């Protein structure tokens, strides 16, 4: 471990950041409580303190990612509450949020990620390429330039994050727990890298939050925090002096308020008595796991005895997690065998599951349930007796220090507290075995010791077997035995002290690193030591230029988002196919399925007359193509039943004496009942029935008079225009195109912003010079292109498959389509900006597009015929206007001049929606 | 024992939903405002149809005909001249343009056949058909009434006494309100279960569940009952408060029987939601996939246009969709007051489709769990 050596004297320059009475509240929680601090510039400032004391909140405020609530923060000589100053300084600040690769894009390659950030900061191609090449070489990532960021190990992700942060030569680098969850070797490389960077750029200030006290000991200046307040500041030596502690860890504990600090005492591990009983708890033989041609776990063997604490160490991505998943039955092994308590691991073995507690690497509890609800739910799922649950929950809360936060939601808690909750959940049912995947990652030293006390207690007194993976060497030392794993293989297994002896190393870390370096000769390894390459120091003029924020609008930044979004889209071929093929399928289904031309209506007759005339009347109906006759109706009860069941749409009753009365010339009435349950069908039935009735009367009249009487007849010559055959297809097809071009593009963009919010990369909008407008427009362009391609495909389908020709101007149609899909993608963006979850965005988009587009836009009924809210929505909804354009150009042979009135609303809709999106989108977290 | 797990996990789902105020707002919106505005937008099939009249006759009869078109079926006719007719129809301002030629009244009175020309914008299918029928009827009626007294009619005195049952006014609001509710039931149940499953997948909580003594069957059953319950409650509230209360739609049959049918329908659609959730690998994929299923379900189920007029293969295909049966039973129970003795085939069909979908998605769910971990 060689973090940068203290540079001794702090250079007396103006502070890089000045905080005055800064407070921050999240609803009920006071995250920061009137903090006043001057952070020295040009050195490494470390922030130490337990979880949830406000380090991350403070960092996001300094970086400008979060809006200041009270107090003032000056960074690099200006007020961060001032928007103009934020714009000025953001190219000089780099911020790496907590969490492995949180602000990276998992489907983009290493190079593409770095390139994206370079573009955001306005670098031209040559400069960008040079910087990226240098940075990747310096971090040892060059061999992996083409690998997707999501497939990198944790350590490599952090290095890439650093590359992205350094791409624009910041004057202030803010690193929030950059080495949490990173293996010792990668951690060492990371600090070496920082040291070299600082060597080349002595003026740069670095703020680091860390959970590793041995790292903090090497920093220039420290801020110890607790409970949203600053406990003490000074050089590590000053802090030690202040408290009289020997190590920084002790010093920190001495600084804590008495209630928290006094319980601290060094951990004592009672010896493990192996002879007591030699029962095997976990056994792995030749365990192998392959994903395609990649072997994640390669013939791993080990045997863990009951009551043993077995440590699993190794570089990030070496197969530890996969091995643990095989043991829990989550993944079936490709080869080999694993046994728990002598039983072969079986995914369906519910009984064994009840004896095992498992904690995953990432937080995987329900963020929508409170801490207490999470604990209670898991207790119930593990079938603890209901009456014992409250006591057990209280006990776990006390053990893991969760008492004060029992009613909080996990998302509001810092990483360390969430990890404690995960562990509490894994242990709630008092399992015989615990499989813990990096349980203490991100947990502060005090809480970590608390963990270990519990685990040692469980192992020694209750004979619980503990299988734990960790990156902390002092934790590894506490294990009875450890395995070193690398690239899917177990290198060595033994007691920690024995390993140190074997290697002749003074610390376990040295032994570990020497094993790893020996094992990793190949270039494909994560542990490749970075080549000794000096970091680039760009020439001064170029830096000067970069530090200009680049105006309020930069095409390069905009296109940077475009490029990134289209790369992501290209990497998701399923989504692309769904979007293109899906619309074609829908067009087929709707085009053929929706038919206004109602035929084959069912009817039945109650003929009480049974004369020649009455039969003639019935024949007149049943002979038409519109009606199908069902069995005659017997009586009113029969009619009622059959109409209720929906069997017949029309019932005709011919009264007794119908034929006789008619010949006499007296007035007779035929009764007809229509099923009104579906009004549209009923209207059609009514129309047909009336028409055929009139037809029959005319023919009877002609027969009786034997002459072609024209007196009083009006010929109504109906011309069905634009669609002379009155077929549904020519009417529907041009209407379906607008419908689909609204829903699919809106759905595509609706998730894009909210997804960044859920996954964390939205922080790049907060802390880089990109403006809201650039962000919104840039992200849309790929979807716009996709939607236009979609439009062309749908039009081709209409013309060549459905044979609905475009009789008007294709240019007008295409121009309208372009404006229209612009409106659709922007509408999706607007929905996305105010939704918080992806589910709500999907639901919201479905509601806000389907109803207006299908019902209010004139697809079935013209907008002028609508009433109330529907009419109001229909008048302004973009689909209405594009529908007019589509029908006009397809069926009515129209061009630009005729359709002017429909282009204007579309032209207005796009800027209005974009403006709305820009207003709703926040440039800072609140 | 399994029941307890199903209950606890279901309660967890409900708690999660309660934490998402935007989601709750959207549910309320969908079952109130969306139903109301959708139902009232088009009160009748032929409503405020825009009509223009080119009157070249300027006779009492032609004026009489023009006066016979009035709201709510038609907008008050706009009198235009021949030259503006085409432009207005091109711009979509009028659905109908009636051209009454010069000497129309004189020709009729002198016993010659007279011809009026009716131009119909046939791209507006729904108005074109019904409206054409109405206009013919109105013109004939007016002409006959006008001519009565000049000479005895030769038409036999047979009346067709047409009455619409179950909805005497053929009020489209009645129909639209319930169909909107049905559309929302389907949409919401698919989104709630499918997207919730993907969310758990993206957050890694499914994996967490699988190391506990919980079976995939229990996880699925819990999602189904809890989300179905939410939708069922929303449906009942919407039906009683909005449809029956606000919109004054008389409901003939038993709401309880309808809700029972809704329950069966939800069994099928929530299973479908989970099925889609296992097919999609990310939320954006799910969004598209859902649209791909939802639109045909809504448009081809018979709730938008009559099933009779669809091509045979579509009709047969849609028999396997739960919506089709749900729309049928909804119409039968709510409008025609049908009882279980009439709608039992739909109940059986829904139960069958639901069971098939449930086991299909259970199989998929089990299979994809490996890829989720």
Image (tube, helix red, strand yellow):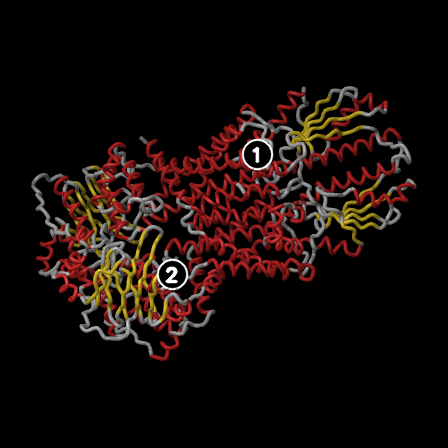
Secondary structure beneath disc 2? loop
Q: Which residue is mark 1?
A: B244
Q: Position of residue B79 (x, y in %)?
A: 79, 51
Q: Quadrant of the C terminus of chain A?
A: bottom left
Q: Residue at x 64, y 51 (%)?
A: A803
Q: Are marks 2 and 1 in contact (CB under 8 Å)?
A: no
The picture places residue A462, in percent across and down from the top left corner, at: 14, 39
**x, y percentage for residue A601?**
66, 33
* Residue A65 left/right relative to A140: right
Observer-nearest residue: A70 or B235?
A70
Q: Which of the chains bears the disc numbered 1?
A: B
Q: Residue at left 79%, top 34%?
A: A695
**Would you identify the image quadrant in which residue A806 lies?**
bottom right
Decide: is B211 above or below A884: above
Instruction: Please state if A803 lies on the left or on the right of A284 as rendered.
Output: right
Q: Which picture quadrant has residue A146? A: bottom left
Q: Which residue is mark 2?
A: A67
Side (left or right) of A604 relative to B248: right
- Identify whether B167 is placed above or below A324: above
Subunit of label 2: A
Given residues A16 and A696, the one toward you in this image is A16
Mark 1, secondary structure of its residue: helix
* Local crowd size for mark 2, using a 10 Å CA cut-off: few (<14), some (14–19), many (≥20): some
């Amino acid at each position: 471990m060689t973090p940068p050596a203290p540079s001794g004297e702090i250079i007396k320059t103006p502070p890089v950041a000045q905080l005055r009475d800064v407070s921050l509240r999240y609803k009920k929680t006071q995250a920061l409580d009137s903090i006043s601090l001057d952070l020295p510039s040009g050195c490494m400032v470390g922030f130490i303190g337990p979880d949830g004391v406000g380090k991350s909140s403070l960092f996001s405020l300094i970086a400008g990612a979060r809006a200041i609530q009270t107090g003032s923060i000056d960074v690099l000589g200006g007020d961060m509450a001032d928007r103009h100053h934020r714009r000025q300084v953001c190219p000089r600040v780099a911020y790496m949020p907590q969490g492995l690769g949180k602000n990276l894009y998992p489907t983009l390659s290493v190079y593409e990620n770095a390139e994206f950030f370079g573009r955001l900061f306005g670098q031209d191609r040559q400069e960008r390429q040079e910087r990226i090449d240098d940075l990747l070489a310096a971090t040892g990532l060059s061999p992996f330039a083409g690998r997707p960021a999501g497939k990198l190990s944790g350590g490599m992700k952090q290095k890439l994050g650093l590359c992205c942060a350094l791409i624009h030569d910041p004057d202030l680098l803010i690193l929030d727990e950059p080495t949490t969850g990173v293996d010792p070797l990668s951690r060492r490389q990371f600090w070496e890298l920082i040291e070299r960077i600082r060597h080349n750029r002595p003026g740069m200030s670095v703020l680091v939050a860390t959970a590793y006290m041995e790292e903090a000991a090497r920093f220039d200046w420290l801020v110890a925090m607790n409970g949203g307040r600053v406990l003490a500041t000074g050089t590590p030596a000053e802090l030690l002096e202040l408290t009289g502690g020997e190590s920084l860890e002790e010093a920190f504990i001495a600084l804590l308020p008495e209630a928290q600090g006094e319980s601290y005492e060094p951990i004592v591990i009672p010896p493990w008595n192996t002879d007591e009983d030699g029962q095997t708890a976990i056994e792995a033989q030749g365990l192998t796991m392959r994903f395609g041609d990649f072997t994640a776990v390669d013939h791993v063997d080990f045997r863990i005895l009951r009551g043993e604490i077995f440590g699993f160490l190794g570089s990030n991505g070496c197969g530890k997690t996969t091995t643990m998943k095989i043991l829990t039955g989550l993944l079936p092994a490709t080869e080999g065998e694993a046994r728990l308590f002598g039983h072969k691991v079986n995914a369906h073995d519910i009984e064994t599951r009840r004896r095992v507690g498992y904690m995953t690497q990432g937080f995987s509890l329900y963020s929508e349930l409170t801490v207490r609800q999470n604990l209670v739910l898991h207790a119930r799922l593990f079938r603890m007796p209901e009456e014992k649950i409250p006591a057990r929950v209280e006990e776990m809360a006390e053990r893991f220090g969760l008492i004060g936060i029992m009613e909080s939601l996990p998302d509001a808690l810092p990483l360390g507290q969430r990890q404690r909750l995960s562990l509490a959940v894994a242990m709630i049912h008092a399992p015989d075995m615990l499989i813990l995947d990096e349980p203490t990652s991100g947990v502060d030293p005090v809480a970590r010791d608390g963990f270990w006390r519990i685990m040692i207690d469980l192992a020694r007194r209750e004979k619980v077997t503990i299988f734990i993976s960790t990156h902390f060497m002092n934790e590894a030392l506490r294990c009875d035995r450890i395995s070193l794993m690398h690239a899917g293989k177990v290198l060595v297994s033994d007691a920690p002290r024995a390993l140190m002896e074997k290697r002749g190393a003074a610390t376990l870390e040295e032994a570990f690193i020497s094993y790893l370096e020996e094992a990793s000769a190949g270039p494909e390894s994560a542990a490749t030591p970075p080549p000794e390459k000096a970091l680039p120091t760009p020439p001064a003029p170029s830096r000067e230029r970069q530090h200009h924020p680049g105006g309020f609008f930069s095409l390069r930044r905009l296109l940077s988002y475009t490029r990134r979004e289209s790369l992501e889209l290209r990497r998701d071929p399923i989504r692309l196919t769904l979007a293109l093929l899906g619309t074609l399928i829908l067009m087929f289904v709707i085009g053929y399925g929706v038919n206004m031309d109602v035929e084959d209506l069912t009817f039945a007759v109650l003929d009480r007359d049974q004369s020649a005339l009455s039969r003639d009347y019935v024949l007149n109906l049943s002979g038409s193509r519109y009606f199908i006759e069902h069995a005659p109706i017997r009586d009113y009860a029969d009619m009622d039943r059959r109409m209720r069941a929906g069997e017949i749409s029309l019932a005709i009753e011919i009264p007794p004496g119908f034929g006789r009365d008619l010949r006499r010339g007296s007035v007779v009435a035929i009764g007809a009942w229509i099923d009104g349950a579906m009004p549209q069908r009923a209207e059609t039935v009514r129309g047909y029935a009336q028409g055929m009735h009139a037809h029959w009367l005319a023919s009877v009249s002609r027969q009786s008079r034997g002459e072609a009487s024209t007196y009083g007849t009006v010929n109504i010559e109906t011309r069905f225009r634009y669609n002379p055959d009155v077929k549904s297809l020519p009417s529907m097809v041009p209407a379906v195109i607008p419908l689909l071009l609204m829903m699919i593009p809106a759905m595509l963009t609706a998730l894009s912003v909210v997804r960044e919010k859920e996954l964390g990369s939205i922080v790049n909008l907060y802390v880089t010079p990109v403006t809201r407008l650039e962000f919104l427009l840039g992200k849309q362009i790929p979807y716009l292109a996709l939607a236009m391609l979609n439009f062309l495909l749908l039009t081709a389908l209409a013309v060549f498959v459905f044979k609905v020709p475009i009789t008007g101007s294709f240019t007008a149609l295409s121009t309208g389509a372009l404006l229209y899909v612009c409106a659709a993608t922007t509408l999706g963006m607007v929905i996305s900006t105010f939704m918080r979850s992806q589910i709500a965005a999907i639901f919201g988009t479905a509601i806000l597009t389907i109803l207006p587009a299908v019902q209010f836009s004139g697809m079935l009924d013209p907008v002028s015929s609508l009433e109330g809210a529907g009419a109001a929505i229909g008048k302004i909804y973009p689909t209405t206007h594009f529908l007019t354009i589509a029908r006009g150009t397809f069926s009515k042979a129209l061009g630009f001049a005729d359709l002017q009135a429909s282009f204007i609303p579309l032209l207005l809709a796009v800027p209005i929606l974009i403006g709305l999106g820009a207003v709703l989108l926040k440039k800072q977290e609140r | 024992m399994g029941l307890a797990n199903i209950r606890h996990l279901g309660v967890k789902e409900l708690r999660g939903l309660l934490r998402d105020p935007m989601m709750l707002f959207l549910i309320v919106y969908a079952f109130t405002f969306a139903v109301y505005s959708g139902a009232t937008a088009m009160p009748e099939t032929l409503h405020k149809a825009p009509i223009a009249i080119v009157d070249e006759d300027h006779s009492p009869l032609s004026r009489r005909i023009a006066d016979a078109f009035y709201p709510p079926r038609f907008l008050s006719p706009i009198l235009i001249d021949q030259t503006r007719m085409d432009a207005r129809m091109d711009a979509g301002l009028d659905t109908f343009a009636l051209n009454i030629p010069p000497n129309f009244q004189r020709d009729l009175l002198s016993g010659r056949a007279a011809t009026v020309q009716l131009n119909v914008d046939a791209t507006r299918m729904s108005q074109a058909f019904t409206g054409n029928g109405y206009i013919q009827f109105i013109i004939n009626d007016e002409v006959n009434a006008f001519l009565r007294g000049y000479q005895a009619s030769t038409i036999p005195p047979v009346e067709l006494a047409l009455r619409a049952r179950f909805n005497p006014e053929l009020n489209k609001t009645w129909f639209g309100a319930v169909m909107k509710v049905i559309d929302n039931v389907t949409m919401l149940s698919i989104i709630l279960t499918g997207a919730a499953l993907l969310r758990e997948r993206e957050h890694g909580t499914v994996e967490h569940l699988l190391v506990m003594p919980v079976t995939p069957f229990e996880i699925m059953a819990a999602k189904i009952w809890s989300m179905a319950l939410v939708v069922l409650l929303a449906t009942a509230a919407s039906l009683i408060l909005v449809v029956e209360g606000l919109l004054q739609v008389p409901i003939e049959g038993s709401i309880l029987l309808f809700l029972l049918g809704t329950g069966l329908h939800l069994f099928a659609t929530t299973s479908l939601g989970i099925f889609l959730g296992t097919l999609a690998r990310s939320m954006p994929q799910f969004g598209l996939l859902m649209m791909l299923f939802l639109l045909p379900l809504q448009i081809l189920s018979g709730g938008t246009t009559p099933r009779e007029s669809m091509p045979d293969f579509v009709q047969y295909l849609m028999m396997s969709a739960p919506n089709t049966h749900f729309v049928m039973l909804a119409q039968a129970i709510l409008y025609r007051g049908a009882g279980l003795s009439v709608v039992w085939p739909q109940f059986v069909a829904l139960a069958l489709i639901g069971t098939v979908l449930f086991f299909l998605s259970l199989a998929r769910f089990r299979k994809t769990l490996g890829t989720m971990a």
